[in-house]
Amino acid sequence: MGQIVAFSGNQAIAEGMRQINPDVCAAYPITPQTELMQQFASFVSDGVVDTELVTVESEHSAMSACVGAAAAGGRVMTATSAQGLALMWEIMYCASGLRLPIIMTIVNRALNAPLNIHGDHSDAMGARDSGWIQIFSENAQEAYDNLVQAVRIGEKASVRLPVAVCYDGFIISHSIERMEILEDEEVKGFVGPYQNKFHPLLDVAHPVTYGAVDLQDYYTEHKRQQVEAMKNALPVVLEIAEEYKKLSGRGFGYFEAYRLEDAEIGMFIMGSAAGTAKDVVDELRATGVKAGLLKLRVFRPFPYQEVSAALKNLKVLAIMDRAESFGAMGGPTFNELRSALLNLKTPPLTFNYIYGLGGREPSLAEIHKAFARAREVLTAGKVEVLHDYLQVRE
Amino acid sequence: MNAGGAPATKPITIKQLAQRPEILAGGHRLCPGCGAPIAVRQILLASDYPVVLANATGCLEVSTSIFPFTSWRAPWIHNAFENAAATISGAEAMYRSLKRQGKIPPEQEIRFIAFGGDGGTYDIGLQSLSGALERGHRFLYVCYNNEGYMNTGIQRSSASPMGADTTTSPVGQVSPGKREFRKDLTSIIVAHEIPYVAQSATIPSRWGELINKVRKALEVPGPSFINVLASCNRGWRHNIDETLELTQLAVDTCYWPLYEVVNGEYRLTYKPKEKKPVTEWLKRQGRFRHLFRSENEGIIKRVQEKVDQDWERLLKKCGEL
């Protein structure tokens, strides 16, 4: 069985990486990811992992080296935040297009300009179409659990896609929590040895060309195969979660449905603020308000059928985005979720709040404000303002 | 390493080379007369070991890997334009990791070679290359330098010579072509203090010039770099059967001196019997045709002065003066 520890999110991930023991890790330091890589570097220096740590000169080279290492044939991990992810962006498409199951921790942080080092989802949302599986975490425990599962999801032969494990900068990365980590042998057994089935570069007896030029006659088919791999990832996420539950006792799905069964008004949210929002749901329930919440864990592939089915009985839904999509009809998750809900016979009325930008943590009162708006919409039977800001001076 | 500091290499004969299998298969789609595949074939023949290759985006890459075909009979990866060095460094790191863990047998020797054009090396890929060299990965980086962004249509690069007519430094009413001297990338690489750096070319007068340098580079226990002048007849504007002649002229005018720097020690590997005027090289190429108009005399003079100055400095570094 595991052991109870007091870890920050970064410590939890560093421990997870030590237990997974990747063959190569290429990374570049950036706040708030920094201490994660520092701690992992000391594991390398103390010889407690077999990892070759490549201390590159930029995140662009970090992802490039990860691609080279993964194509060479082995387990590869990295981590970054914000600008670092933005700099990697070009090569994230190469990682997914070459079907390399690299595992990356994204310690979510706001994008410059203006410069801000604190948590929001702008970085991960900017890479949402890069072909990476994206899994979000509410706390250090989930970040750790997601990391261990990510290895299996990405490396599954029917998937073979890179996976990003996301958690909010500072609020998760730097807060110390009580959590449980598995024994080293349990993690080792769960992730298993890396399976080199696809003639990697180091298989010199079977030379393979990686990264060919692919023109009008084949490019579409290869992109279509990537879509299929994403679809395949959906059942694999549940299959691995089931196996992980047997090992850890902690169950995971595509999302967590919180007091949704008979709810009339609901909230859709990702990441650390879900904890605060669940407290607000409890307070509302105590006063007789039928409130519920859906916290999304797997953002890519977007489990739109399951999510919309879970929200089908709601009358009003507040969709919370911790990132802006400038000039769009609301934030990134609002757009996708609202579209998914159109499949329902009687979809809930929806509106969008942008919150938590640049680390502005939502208070209980602010989450209450969002639910109060939902109650107004319920009474009025219509949405007056589709896209609004929860915490802003205007 | 032998006492002189030069890496020990086994000599190889041209007959032995002829018996080795070609790694770059024929039927690729590089232009007739392109200098790149001549260099690449020699480089790959030179290796006594299995190789893993990385290729920056560029002519060599796009013309040899058009799906569902490939010209590469060795493991090969193209990642992007500016990251061939970082990519090969990752592959080499994986090799070291797996070997250390006993997942690759100890007797399995592999060499890692990255190819980039001057665009991918002098310019957009310089940071990635510098980082990989500083980190000490054991790999050979080959810049096949055709002095411009030829793949995208003959734009200037920082390797393009002064006065070159390119599509982004076109000769016009008020412009005589590229106004700046090229960057001395080989010296920048030397400043990284890696074990082996060379400047080379495929010249008819010395069949082993490039091959022997590659063999030395593949023996050093760290990074190595070779800057190979490779003509692009489309960009340089000469006949397709003049590639090697033009390369020989670049060397014989001392516009492109051949030398190596082994553990910081410079050595000239070829000294022309008679140093020809740079105009011998310039006048054979359409990209310099305008320089021979009377108003551009000054440019030719400056180019010659720079060649003379650089050559003299190099001779001093090599202990030839």
Image (cartoon, coloured by chain):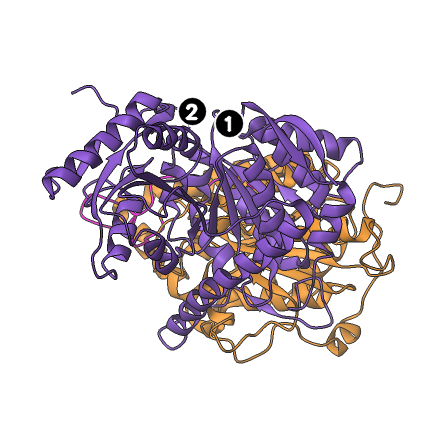
How packed is label 2: few (under 14 Cα within 10 Å), some, or many (20 or more)? many
A58 or A361: nearer the viewer: A361
Q: Is residue B196 magenta?
A: no
Look at mark 1 in the image and give the residue it sits on: A32
Q: Is residue B304 left or right of residue A148?
A: left
Instruction: Estimate the x, y position of residue A149 in percent, counting from the top left.
Output: 60, 50
Say what amino acid the circle numbered 2 marks: Ile
Whether residues under marks 2 and 1 lie with C-beta atoms below 8 angstroms apart, the answer is: yes
Among the two numbered marks 2 and 1 on one chain, the one whose residue lies closer to the N terminus: 1
Query: In percent of the image, x 36 and y 43: which residue is there?
Result: A126
As drawn, the chain in orange is B
Residue B267 visible in the shown view: no
A258 or A95: nearer the viewer: A258
Look at mark 2 in the image and give the residue it sits on: A117
State the hue of chain A.
purple
Q: Is residue A391 left or right of residue A87?
A: left
The magenta stretch is B164-185
Q: Which mark is residue B265?
A: none
Residue A254 visible in the shown view: yes
Instruction: Please tell me whether mark 1 sits on a helix, a strand or a loop.
Output: loop
Residue A364 drawn above or below residue B30: above
Say what amino acid the circle numbered 1 marks: Pro
What is the chain letter for disc 1? A
